[in-house]
Image: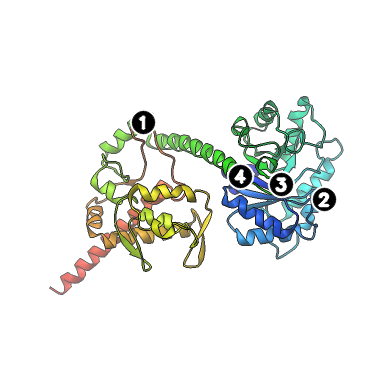
Amino acid sequence: MKNSIEKFKTVFPEKSLIVALHSKSVSHALEWAEIAYQNGAHGVAVVTHFIESTEWLDAIEKIKEKYPYHKAILNIIQLDPKLIFEAMTLPNTIFPDGIWTDKSDWIKPGNENWADMTLKIQEEMWREWLYFGWLDFKYQGPLAESDYPKAIAQAKKYLDVITTSGPGTGEAADVEKVKKIKNLAWDFPFALASGVDAHNIKGYIEYVDAFIVATGISKDYYNLDPEKVLELSTIIYLYNRKMARKRFEQEILKKYGVNSVTELDNYIRNNEIINIWGRPEAQEIEKKLSNLYPSPFTLDGVEYASVEAFRMYIKYPEWYANRESIRELSSLKAKMSWDDSKFIRSFKYHWEEIEMWSEKHHALLKMALRAKLQQNPDILKDLLETGDKKIIHIIFDKDRTSLSPDSKTIPWEKFAQLYTELRDEFKYRKNVNYQISFLFI
């Protein structure tokens, strides 16, 4: 039995923008996918108005080959879901992250057998993708509000993402309608697929998990407007950031068994916990372990002014105009450069493509932290003198009454774990060197 909520969160873990591409060809789809991704879209939907059925998988394959860590779904209007899923059994093909169709009619009485067959095909496949299907969708005819409970119950059985829309292409959905569907669907994934733009998204964002948008971010039917994509994706980004801050604060307070950030601050101070951050009131060792601390080091033949400069530098491609100047930055100047990289999903290091937030990314950061300690012996000495004290990395705001959201790049527990492992590693080295030197006395 598929778990649609878990599947959806794996592909789209936060509120997401999926840019619908009205593509004339495979090359056109690839061109506009690049514009969408570079301007913050979480995914694209290749709409098959004009691409022949023999080409739609080719479009997805080329997009996924070039952008392996971005998401791409297919909006197939020529075929019903059962035929689509049967076509997906082809071997040796790069498949989409989701299928979106507004042709299915599983709500009508008598269609359950057809819908059950479609569901069976999905469950028998070893490949998994999200199935976006309609509910009270444009061109399907309006659904009476009294039919919502039964329709949504059916949708949860057959779909992975309930998708609704306004009355027509480019027409905004009624906000009350969106609220009612979400309230009935509760935590089941819910997408909105028409009429969304930077001016009205705030009315929907609390209730919608994924926005499938074309008209509101396009110059015309076929061509995206990069500035509009960026504007809309930034609104979604800031909302996600705000909600992440709230969740993180709640989780941390619960973890430490306290009721407020002030209590948490006192707990950390009273228990001699090493909390890495760069505020003036922090302990000296806490400042020195911060990525923002001026601590020059060389890694793989390249010099960096701080670990933060390293973190920022590796994200940018070689053609980025300010790339070389970034590795010379320390303190907050390096962190400020982050704004240009907030939508990056992967980067290249020594010709290897590395996914942001992956174990390889974290291993690379550990290499940089090790180099920092090796080449700044005063910092290493201070770290070793912390003994076995617990290391954490929780950032308070200026008045110490709220917390900053946890880092997506490297969560605080992972960052603290890396420094704890490095402290143990250097302790072991010190002990081994002492024992060897003792043998030669």
Q: Is residue 17 above or below residue 355?
A: above
- Which residue is labeled 3 in the image? 131
- Could you tell me the amino acid type at mark 2? Gln
Secondary structure under tag 2 reads: loop
Q: Is disc 2 in contact with disc 1, using a CB cutoff of under 8 Å? A: no
Front one among 391 and 224: 224
Secondary structure under tag 4 reads: helix
Q: How far apart in space, not on screen, are marks 1 and 3 (Cα)?
A: 43 Å
Front one among 27 and 282: 27
Query: Horizontal placement of 130 versus 278: left or right?
Result: right
- Could you tell me the amino acid type at mark 4? Val
Dot placed on the residue nearer the N-terminal end, 3 or 4: 3
Q: Is residue 187 above or below residue 334?
A: above
Q: Give coordinates of residue 248: x percent, y percent.
A: 45, 38
Dot placed on the residue nearer the N-terminal end, 3 or 2: 2
- Could you tell me the amino acid type at mark 1? Thr
Q: How far apart in space, not on screen, are marks 1 and 4 (Cα)?
A: 35 Å
- Which residue is labeled 2 in the image? 78
Q: Is residue 309 above or below residue 2?
A: below
Foreground mark, 4 or 2, reads: 4
Front one among 93 and 426: 93
- Which residue is labeled 4 in the image? 229
Dot placed on the residue nearer the N-terminal end, 1 or 4: 4
Secondary structure under tag 3 reads: strand
- Which residue is labeled 1 in the image? 401
Front one among 39 and 348: 39
